[in-house]
Each structure stands twice: as structure tokens, then as C-alpha cells.
Image (cartoon, coloured by chain):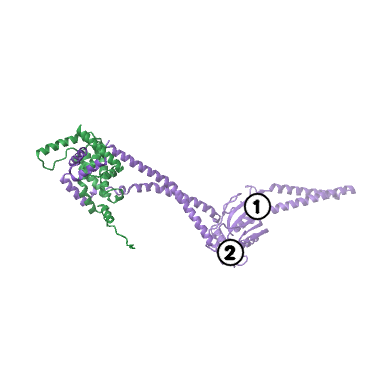
Chain colours: A purple, B green
Amino acid sequence: MSDQLAAIDDALETGAADHHDPLTRELQELALALQADAPEPDAGFERELRGRVERGFPKPASSRRPLWRRMMTPAFATGLVVLPLVLIVVVAGGGGQSDDGGGGGGGGGGSVAAESGGHDSGATAGAGRGAAPPAVEARQQALARAGAQPELESGGGSAGRLVLPPDDGFAPGQRNRKIERSIGLELEMPVDEMAQVAEQVTTVTNRHGGFVLSSSVSTGEDGAGGDFQLRIPATELRPALRDLAALADVRTQTQTGRDVTRQHVTAKDRLQAARAERRSLLRRLELATTDEEAEAIRRRLDIVAGEINGLRSQLRSLRLRTDYAVVTVTLLRKDGDQGGAVGGSFDDALGDAGDLLVGVAGLIVRALAVALPLGLIALLGWLAGRVVRRRQRESALA
Amino acid sequence: MDTTPARSYDVTEALVESVPLVASADSEGFAELYERAFPRVYAYVASLLRDRAAAEDVTSQAFERAYRKRRSYRPARGSIDAWLFRIARNAALDELRKRKRRAVLEVDPEDTVSRTPEDHAELAVRRETVRAALASLDGQERDLIALKFAGGLSNAEIARVLGMSESNAGTRMHRTITKLREACHE
């Protein structure tokens, strides 16, 4: 077979069928006949096409496709589909991270001016005792400028938002209710501000007529923090809480209230009754005619006196609990604050760089998760289209 | 010991020869390709379409497509002729499909060479025989014959155009031309 094909090629090249084998020579002659019968082009057409080749196949202006059709290459069309999806994934991924960051930064939401001053502790370290540090003053001024009308909200913690107890207690419409209140306040600040804030807690408490029941402050690098048990007059509770909240960023605030009006009224009524009984016993004692009768009245008077003392003590305790709110202030170190210089250490920088790389890698993985399947589908579609086009073309020869 | 490396001039010449005419992708190189390949491309297209007007349109279209895509040609993927004939074949098949016509070899080429009456009669008979034999071939076999004898391609180039191996192209070529010879004897 290969010899005959080679002989045919020789014949086509030389133009002669001269093989010694008759069969092969016959194939050579057939090949020459086919070659000789090949159609020849018209001379005019050849000249015209040559002219077009020399001019570089200029296109008439009217036949030029519009710009958008020329731009609509397969790659561009694929990009039009894939790019928005990738952007959606990237934005969604970035949004998710932003939400996380927002949660972390929420603690600082209530102190806009505090951030710039928060790291200014070096300049405020020498501030005099009792004087509010610049950061604290800034917070107070910011709150004052904003009108600082904190949102009223009862119960539950709310990070970064000051919640004050309502003026009218827990039973709206009732006057002279006896409400026992307790407030929990978590303040966070850089370690280097903690000592000053602790001083300010005491100052604010005193300024509003309250007192510090107990306090514990630690300013070391490890385990820095503080706890204060305060008693603040109920009438001064709102302004006192506002001032306390201005000392640092409020991370959480909790509030509980218990209506003890019934206990108060009951104790008061029982006290009045006991006093009336004592007065009655005293009158009966004056009128007693026998020693036995007088002795029995005295014993009864002793019992009533003890009862009056107990009720007085109970009323005093109730009054103390309702007139003074229990405020628990907890000082916390701000998240991510290492107490070092502004800008952090080299380890911090490495950590941040690692986090950044992980974030970027996550975004890339998300983008690839969308782009790769789409690209694969597009590739398969393109290959399938090629096969179909090829078969359609070949079908013309069937 | 002589360590001077010997220079191979053969290799240099081979490299020079392998550089295609339009490797530089300029109009001048393409004009050379046109001068060399135009008659064969036209003959191949006309053989497939069996219509001179359509063959001229498709040939013109094929060269224009090749000119616009000339930068996409890669020498590693085959000769420039195979590349050009593949474009021409696609254009011709598109035209055939568009016109819903079956591919039949053109069988009435013009005689451009004067011959003696005896030669003329003998040639006419031989052509008529070959024409009848060609009619017995299917479309793909006629395509193969057109690529070989009208287009003047080698078996390797035909394999490139048709997307098959060279040995397969050779086998099919041998089978087809043998079939054509047998048809000439019927």
C-alpha cells in the first residue's frame, strides 16, 4: 500500500506514470488524470482576489459590525457572566467579615470621641487626681453635645449602648412605688486607662451622693480589671449612670427591678398598728389596779416594742434598698489591647498579616468555588459546540 | 583533545526551511502564500461545490478568513497549507450545508491546452470514465480525492486537515483510489 501511495506521489510530482508494476502504473495514470481535471480559476477572479490580498482585504464601512458586536468575543461574554458572580461572592464574603468586625467594634459604638483619645494615655498619665482624663472628658463632652438621651431599655445586656432605668419605676401610673433597682455595667478600656477610670468611678459616685460599698482594681498586664459595688441614690441614678458610662466604652449593661411597695406598705401598716397597740397598752397600764394586771401589760408592751423595732428595721432596710440603687461596675480590658505602644508589636503585625492572608485566601477560595464550576461548564459547552459544529459541517458530505 | 564544538549547518538550514511564509504575520508573507496556494485552493473548493460562482465566493472568503486569522497560525500544529485548506474546507462545507446541496466533484473543467484530435478524443473518453467512477464515491471519499489531486496536499497535510492520523489518511487514500480504479473498469 505504501509503495503504491509513494508511486502515486512520484507520478504527481514528475507528471509521468512509469512504474513497472501494471497495477501501480494504472493508479499513477488515474492520479494524473484526476490532477489534470482539477478546475482552474478564472483569470479575472484571480486578479481581483490578488488585489484584495494586496490591499489587506479592506472592509466596506457599511459592513463593519457595531462596536458591541466586535467586543462580544467568547472570552468577553464569559467574563460578563462570571465577573458579576465573582463580585457577588467577594462582596458577600467581605460583608460577612464586616459583620464580624462590626460586632467586635460594637462595644465602642457609644463613644465616638473615645477612640482617638483612648490611646492617648501617655499624655494623660500625669493628670491630677480627681481630674477626668482627656479621653473621659472627651466622652463626656461627646455625650453632652449629643444631648446624651440614652435609649430606655429594661432588662438584658446591650453591648455598647447605655440603658437607663425609667423614671417612673416598673409600675407605670402608680406614684410613690417602692422599687428596688440593681444595675450592672461593664466598661472596657485600654489597660493604661484603667487606673484613672477606677478613680473616676469613685469620684462620680461621690458626686451623686452615693458611696462605694466595695471595690477591687487590678492594673497589671495580665488579668487587668476591676469591680465596684456602688450604692447610688435612686434620684441620682440616671445622671450617675450617664457619667459612669462616659468614663469608658460600655460593653454590656444589665438592669433588674423589683417592686417592694407591698412589703413596704404592709410593714408600715403593721408598725402603725403596733404603735397604736402600744399606746393602748400604755393607757391600760396607767389604769391597771392590780400588780398582776400591770405585769401582764408590761410583758405585752415588751413584745409589742420588739415588734415595733423589727418593723422599723425592716422599713429602714426597705427604704435603703429603694432609695439607693445597687450599681455593679466591672472594668474590663478592651479586646485586642495588649497595653503596648500604638501600632502593636512585631508579633501583632505577624498575626495581623496572617489573618489578612487567611481572609484573602478565603475570598479566593469562595471566588474559585463559583468561577471554577462556571468555567468548567463554559468549557464543556464550548467543546460540545465545537463537536456539534464539526458534525454539522461533516454532514454536508454525507 | 579538541573540544571545539562542531557546527551543524544542516540543522540551521532545516530551521530556516521550516519557517512558514506568514510566520511574520505580515501582508507581504500572506501575499506569497496566496500566490503559491490560490490555484490549488480554488481547485479544491470548486471540486467540492461544483459551482464556479460559489467556488469563487468561498475561495475569496477562505483567503479573507485566513488573512484575518493569520496571527493565530501556529507552525507546530501543521504546515501553513494544511491550515489554509482547513479554513477553505470549513468555508466550503458551510456553503454546502447552507445551500443544502450534496458535494459532487466538478467534472467539466475547461481545457486550456490545445491538443490533437486524437489526444482530445482519448482525453475526453478518459475524463468521462473518471467522471462516472467519481460518481460512485461518497462525499467523504470525494473530499479526500479533491484534497489530494485538486489541492495537491501530502498525506500528512490531508491528515491535518481532516483531523486524523497520517497512517489513517494514507490507508483511506489508498482504499479510495483503489475503489476509484475498480469503478473505472466497471
Element class at badge 1: strand
Three-letter code, disc 1: Ser
As drawn, the label of residue A360 is none
As drawn, the label of residue A133 is 2
Estimate how packed mark 1 is, as few (under 14), some (14 to 19) or many (20 or more) residues with alpha carbons within 10 Å.
many
Three-letter code, disc 2: Pro
Locate residue B170, reporting x and y percent: 27, 41
Locate residue A328, reporting x and y percent: 64, 55
Estimate how packed mark 2 is, as few (under 14), some (14 to 19) or many (20 or more) residues with alpha carbons within 10 Å.
many
- Residue lying farthest to the left in this orientation: B117
Residue at position x 33%, y 40% in the image: A387
Q: How many marks?
A: 2
Q: Is residue B98 visible?
A: no
Marks 1 and 2, how far apart at CA? 28 Å
- Front in this rendered view, residue A244 or A363: A363
Locate residue A155, reporting x and y percent: 61, 49
- Residue lying farthest to the front in this orientation: B1
